[in-house]
């Protein structure tokens, strides 16, 4: 039966394909469809892993010292009972036999289902049992993993052949780094239950240029593995089991989109200036060094934001050392052929977790917590290592340092002191760097926007992170779909803040860009031009769309109409002023 689900559109386009359901825990384990005929071998692997854990638990129980606390024995007994309950293996075995999921995937799918059921239970004691189930399942996963190490199964996380090109990923949630791993694999779209429009997961999805809808509550429960799906990434619609007529309508839309993209390519080589000849600079946001190639090809005149933290988020690898980082930064600098590259220092925390391979203090998940520069300043050795790597790359091109999430003057002072220290260290080593490297600050906390002269006096350039500026001004977690409807770039407070930052920076003659998602949204281009913006940094997939708007815009007219927009506090008044601005 055909039905549709609605969520938050994050990446445009129409995708038609088959659902591949991925459970949260499954993102951390091997995940593939087993060959036809190998179902029983796979089922046996799971049974062997259960047996291995049963023996382990029995050994632990027997080996308990006499003076061990009583709870220890009770704890192992409970785990033994959970393991012995045939229900835990039953469903995974069925998934292996009927849907050909590999054993770890099947088990984590069941684990997720159980955890969700437990989450709804009120009783605190029973709720606590969810932890026991998780621990038992994790032991079994570990046992499966050790079979893998012994050479029984050499598959890796979603090996390239696992997912067909017409696959649409459906998941409860996907961490930004896991999303990035999908980048290397061909698939056609993705849908998640959670997420907001400017969550980092959504940003990475957009960078892959495939249709995506997030915040589709219960999608991963209502969609079954193998269901045919249509994703309308522009309107945030997911159609499940579409009929022939719907399919042909969507195929037509798909064709039109391809034609539009082809036409846009014609703009690649034209100068970027408004209709009244105001020159505009378009720069690229990148997550991976190799993205720089496409950025240049599409006409970016620099990298406005290199989110360096993605080098630090691989949960299977140790943090990159100075040499490894230097090579990556150098790669971007080389690919950009002398154009500026703003390397944003590590911004982990909130929805971006550090790779688990690291043994350093964790950052926490609160967007108000130990994030970005706050974290870097608590880990000065890691920060210095990164600064030295960027500085070394600066000997070969225009690498620049950009600092995220500054608000306090003592953070600025400490950051600048450490940059000087990193320079000194390189000097002592006799290694080359640009002593006049430019250092910029991201303006993404309202406090920073309200004391802008502090930043203007101390930095070479500014870049407005509207994703966070909106999050912190409106007190809305950008990754939380429950408040996604309140995430409003048009809020009068936001527009006035933006105008004031750009205006003050221009008066002080310090370069200012916007590198948040607003800069890459063609619906916002004229508004930003009216607010006085001339430097836009966005994912390269948006460059030509934004350029098309710029070529049509008349800045002198927009500037005249902007005061009415800024003064409008009432929604209707603002809608009218915006309509007039864009007309
Ligand atoms: C921003 O906050 O707007 C920004 C560009 O940085 P990030 O999205 O990585 O937080
Ligand atoms: Mg930010």
Image: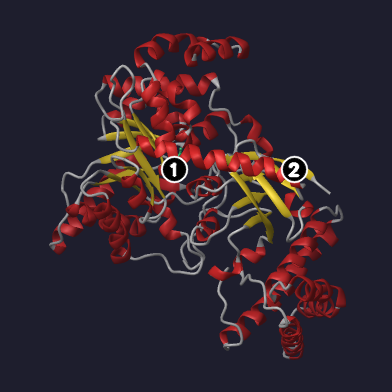
Q: Is residue 142 above or below residue 56?
A: above
Image location of residue 382, percent across then percent down:
36, 59
Mark 1 CB lies closer than 8 A to ligand 1: no
| Residue at left offset 44%, top offset 29% | 447
Image location of residue 91, percent across then percent down:
82, 71
Residue neighbourhood size for the residue with mark 1, other residues' Cα within 10 Å, grouped as few (<14), some (14–19), many (≥20): some
Residue 385 appearing in the image: yes
User: Left of 38 or right of it: where is 468?
Assistant: left
Image location of residue 356, percent across then percent down:
52, 65
Front-lying residue, 109 or 124: 109
Q: Is residue 90 above or below residue 550?
A: below
Disc 2 to disc 1: CB gap under 8 Å? no
Mark 2 vs mark 1: give the one in front. 2
Image-quadrant location for residue 227: bottom right
Residue, far left = 430
Front-lying residue, 345 or 220: 220
Q: Which residue is mark 2?
A: 245
| Residue at left offset 81%, top offset 65% | 129
Q: CA distance from mark 2 to mark 1?
A: 31 Å
Q: Which residue is mark 1?
A: 541
Q: How is the image coloured?
A: secondary structure
């Amino acid at each position: 039966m055909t039905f549709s689900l609605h969520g938050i559109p994050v990446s445009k386009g129409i995708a038609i394909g088959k659902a591949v359901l991925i459970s949260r825990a499954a993102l951390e384990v091997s995940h593939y469809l087993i060959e036809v005929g190998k179902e029983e071998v796979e089922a046996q692997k799971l049974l062997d892993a259960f047996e291995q854990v049963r023996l382990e638990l029995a050994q632990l129980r027997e080996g308990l010292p006499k003076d061990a606390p009583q709870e220890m024995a009770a704890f192992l007994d409970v785990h033994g009972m959970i393991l012995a309950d045939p229900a835990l293996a039953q469903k995974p075995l069925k998934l292996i036999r009927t849907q050909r999921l590999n054993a770890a995937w099947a088990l984590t799918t069941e684990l997720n289902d159980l955890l969700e059921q437990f989450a709804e239970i009120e009783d605190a004691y029973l709720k606590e049992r969810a932890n026991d189930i998780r621990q038992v399942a994790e032991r079994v996963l570990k046992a499966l993993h050790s079979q893998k190490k012994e050479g029984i199964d050499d598959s890796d996380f979603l090996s390239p052949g696992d997912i067909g090109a017409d696959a649409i990923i459906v998941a409860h949630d996907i961490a930004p780094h896991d999303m990035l791993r999908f980048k290397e694999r061909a698939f056609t779209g993705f849908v998640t239950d959670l997420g907001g429009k400017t969550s980092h997961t959504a940003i990475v999805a957009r960078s892959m240029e495939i249709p995506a809808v997030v915040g589709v509550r219960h999608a991963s429960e209502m969609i079954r593995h193998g269901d045919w799906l249509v994703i309308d990434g522009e309107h945030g619609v997911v159609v499940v089991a579409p009929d022939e007529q719907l399919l042909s309508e969507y195929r037509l839309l798909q064709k039109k989109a391809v034609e539009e993209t082809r036409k846009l390519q014609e703009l690649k080589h034209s100068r970027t200036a408004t209709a009244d000849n105001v020159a505009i600079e378009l720069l690229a946001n990148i997550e991976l060094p190799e993205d720089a190639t496409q950025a240049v090809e599409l006409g970016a005149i620099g990298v406005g934001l290199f989110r360096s933290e993605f080098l630090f988020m691989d949960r299977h690898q140790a943090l990159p050392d100075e040499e490894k980082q230097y090579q990556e930064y150098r790669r971007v600098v080389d690919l950009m052929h002398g154009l500026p590259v703003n390397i944003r220092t590590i911004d982990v925390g909130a929805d971006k977790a550090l790779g688990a391979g690291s043994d350093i203090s964790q950052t926490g998940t609160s967007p108000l917590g130990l994030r970005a520069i706050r974290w870097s300043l608590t880990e000065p050795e890691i920060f210095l290592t990164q600064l030295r790597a960027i500085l070394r790359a600066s000997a070969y091109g225009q690498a620049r340092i950009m600092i995220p999430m500054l608000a306090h003057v003592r953070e600025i002072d400490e950051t600048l002191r450490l940059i000087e220290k990193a320079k000194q260290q390189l000097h002592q080593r006799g290694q080359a760097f640009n002593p006049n490297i430019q250092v910029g600050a991201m303006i993404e906390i309202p406090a920073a926007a309200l004391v802008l002269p502090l930043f203007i006096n101390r930095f070479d350039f500014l870049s407005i992170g509207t994703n966070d500026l909106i999050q912190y001004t409106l007190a809305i977690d950008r990754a939380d779909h429950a408040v996604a409807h309140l995430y409003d770039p048009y809020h009068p407070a936001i527009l006035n803040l933006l105008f004031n930052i750009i205006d003050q920076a221009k008066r002080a003659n310090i370069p200012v860009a916007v590198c948040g998602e607003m800069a890459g949204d063609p619906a916002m281009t004229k508004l930003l031009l009216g607010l006085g913006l001339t430097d836009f940094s966005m994912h390269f997939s948006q460059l030509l769309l934004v350029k098309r708007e710029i070529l049509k815009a008349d800045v002198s007219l927009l500037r005249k109409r902007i005061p009415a927009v800024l003064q409008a506090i009432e929604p209707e008044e603002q809608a009218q002023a915006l309509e007039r601005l864009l007309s």
